[in-house]
Image (cartoon, rainbow, N blue to C red):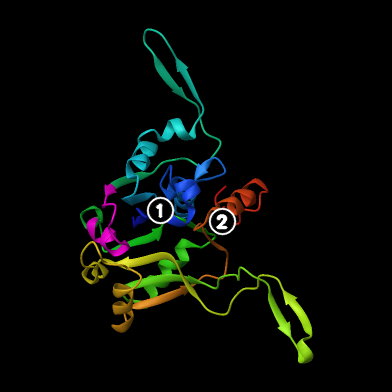
Amino acid sequence: MIQVVILCGGLGTRMREETEFRPKPLVNIGTHPILWHIMQIYAHHGYRDFVFCLGYKGTMIKEYFLNYEAFTHDLTVHLGRGKHVEVHPSLEPDGDFRVTLADTGEETMTGGRIKRVRRHIDGDTFMVTYGDAVADIDIDKVVAFHRSHGKLATLSCVRPTSRFGVLALGAGDRVQAINEKPQLDGWVNAGFFVFNVGVLDYLTGDDCILESGPLDNLAHDDELRAYRHDGVWYPMDTYREVLMLNEMWRAGEARWKVWK
């Protein structure tokens, strides 16, 4: 089974309203952290073996998983002599996961974090994603695409939506149309990587940033391919996006919810 490495160590400085108190992957969408939502996307496709690269407030993520059943299930606590806890079945997806919680340092960059968890990676192929974005991406199709081209690395890319309305202007400064928050023409890195272990040779020390040197070098060596995802992708970089994702969840419009 292919493992999933999730980058969970960043400071989340653009959403200090939340990350002053918790690491970004533990910020809730609904009643569960965004990290739980990401895990469910992978688990829906059968991938349940995770390695978390911890950094800023990483002990809180350890505590969440050490007490996972308490956080995700209803409990009955029987007090007194012979005290015990009864865990009630959950109405939500089963939490049958294998989770490795690895401290990769508070100041380590993304490439350095992956390099640090090398000893926890089994097999010739593994996946990597960020702990702060959700999508309705078909993970099986990404893996099949990766296997089809035979290169070392696959990244998933999306066409982002503009934050602003775009004006179509005509002669005499006439406004011909207003396209409210259209999809842009270019493609951006959405994470949801698939790597062969040879990618690890492109990673150096703790200051190694995956998105610049290593990916550039892989592209230069013709070892990088892009899987184009035409569905939704929602990064959670600001407090405004936290509110937006929560509103979508409450309204039943969370299109990243591919699980039942």
Which of the 4 quarters of the picture holds residue 206?
Answer: bottom left
As displayed, is residue 70 above or below residue 190? above
User: In the rendering, at what x and y percent does residue 260 appear?
Assistant: 57, 47
- In the image, what residue type sits under mark 1? Tyr
As displayed, is residue 207 above or below residue 77? below
Residue drawn at the location 29% of the way across and 52% of the way down: 106
Instruction: Select label 2 or label 1 by which is in front.
Output: 2
Is tag 2's residue or tag 1's residue first in the polypeptide sequence? 1
Cα separation, mark 2 vs mark 1, equals 27 Å
Task: Read off the residue under disc 2.
Answer: 241
Residue drawn at the location 57% of the way across and 66% of the way down: 231
As displayed, is residue 75 above or below residue 149? above
Is 107 one of the magenta-colored residues? Answer: yes
User: In the rendering, at what x and y percent does residue 213 appear?
Assistant: 29, 74
Residue drawn at the location 27% of the way across and 48% of the way down: 102
Which of the 4 quarters of the picture holds residue 152?
Answer: bottom left
Q: Give the range drawn in magenta.
A: 102-116
Task: Read off the residue under disc 1.
Answer: 47
